[in-house]
Amino acid sequence: MRIKRDDLVQVISGKDKGKRGKVLKVIPKEDKVVVQGVNMVKRHQRPIPQLREGGIIEREAPIYACKVMVVCPSCDKPTRVGMKFLEDGTKVRFCKKCGEIIDKA
């Protein structure tokens, strides 16, 4: 997958279209990602003594990875991601719009 944890992504379709958030979790087997503040669902939770309270909690549910695009840190636009090798042999992701390297390392 070309989306990694802690990437800033923008939703491109669905009820949360246009929202931006940080990727909290990547699920490659299901081709899904969990994005902060996107696809919020309510769950009824039973109380467990000394651990947590009961009630209705709101949390993020997974969303298909094809419905989000990585936001380039330099041009601040949602973009496709390309892969290339640097001179030292490391594989990095780059923005297809401006050509800048997305990976932090």
Image: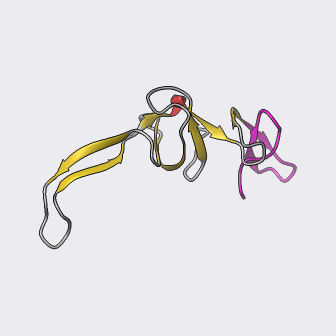
> Total of numbered circles in the picture?
0
Query: Where is residue 8 shown, x and y percent of the image?
Result: 60, 47
Instruction: Identify whether 44 is placed above or below 63.
Output: below
Left or right for 51, reference 73: left
- Comparing 33 with 12, the one in front is 12
Query: Where is residue 45 shown, x and y percent of the image?
Result: 17, 52
Is residue 44 magenta-colored? no
Instruction: Identify whether 100 is placed above or below 13.
Output: below
Query: Where is residue 51 shown, x and y percent of the image?
Result: 20, 69
* Residue drawn at point x = 74 percent, y = 46 percent: 92
* Residue drawn at point x = 83 percent, y = 39 percent: 99
Residue at far right of view? 87
- Comparing 44 with 3, the one in front is 44
Q: Report the predominant secondary structure element of the magenta stretch.
A: loop
The magenta stretch is 82-105
* Residue drawn at point x = 16 percent, y = 73 percent: 50
Q: Quadrant of the C terminus?
A: bottom right
Residue at far bottom of view? 50
Residue at far top of view? 13
Quarter of image, res 83: top right
* Residue drawn at point x = 16 percent, y = 59 percent: 54
Is residue 100 magenta-colored? yes
Left or right for 44, reference 81: left
Q: Quadrant of the N terminus?
A: top right
- Comparing 86 with 31, the one in front is 31
